[in-house]
Amino acid sequence: MNRIVDLISALLNTIIDILKKILEQLIRMEQGGNSGVAALQEPGPQRPDPDRLYSAKYAADRIGVGERTIYRLTQRGMLPVDSYALGMRQFRHSDIERCRRYYRGE
């Protein structure tokens, strides 16, 4: 009986380790990192999907402002937050580009 419990315990620990690795990979993907994801991407020129979601850091880099300014832009309604994933604000690519053009006067 103890051997079965030990086997089940080892199996559950393995499953938990796998789930932790998946969560870490998902967090990296949301933050814009692509380690381990290059094999999943299709080769060739890629156009940004207007509905793809990006982090506040990406939005700040793309618009050319600091993350604090991104917060102010969301408070003023100039850059709507699409969703919250893992406690992080997510913005649509199309909204980021629209805000970038407005903010830069393009």
Image (tube, rainbow, N blue to C red):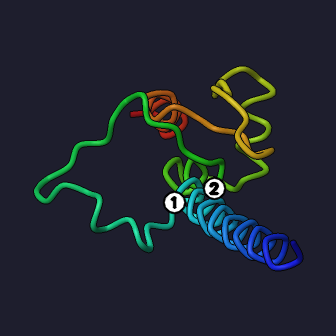
* Left-right relation of 89 to 40: right
Residue 17 in the image, given as x and y percentages of width and height: 69, 72
Q: Secondary structure at mark 2?
A: helix
- Of callouts 1 and 2, the N-terminal one: 1
Q: Amino acid at mark 2?
A: Lys
- The answer to which of 99 and 82 lies nearer the viewer is 82
Residue 104 in the image, given as x and y percentages of width and height: 49, 40
* Left-right relation of 1 to 18: right
Q: How many marks?
A: 2
How many C-alpha atoms fall within 10 Å of the one at disc 2: few (<14), some, or many (≥20)?
Answer: some
Q: Is residue 106 above or below residue 31?
A: above
Residue 101 in the image, given as x and y percentages of width and height: 44, 33
Quadrant in the picture for residue 57:
bottom right
Residue named by callout 2: 57
* Left-right relation of 52 to 10: left
Extreme right residue here? Answer: 2
- The answer to which of 57 and 87 lies nearer the viewer is 87
Q: Amino acid at mark 1?
A: Gly
Q: Nearer the viewer, mark 1 or mark 2?
A: 1
Residue named by callout 1: 32
Q: Badges 1 and 2: C-beta atoms under 8 Å apart? A: yes
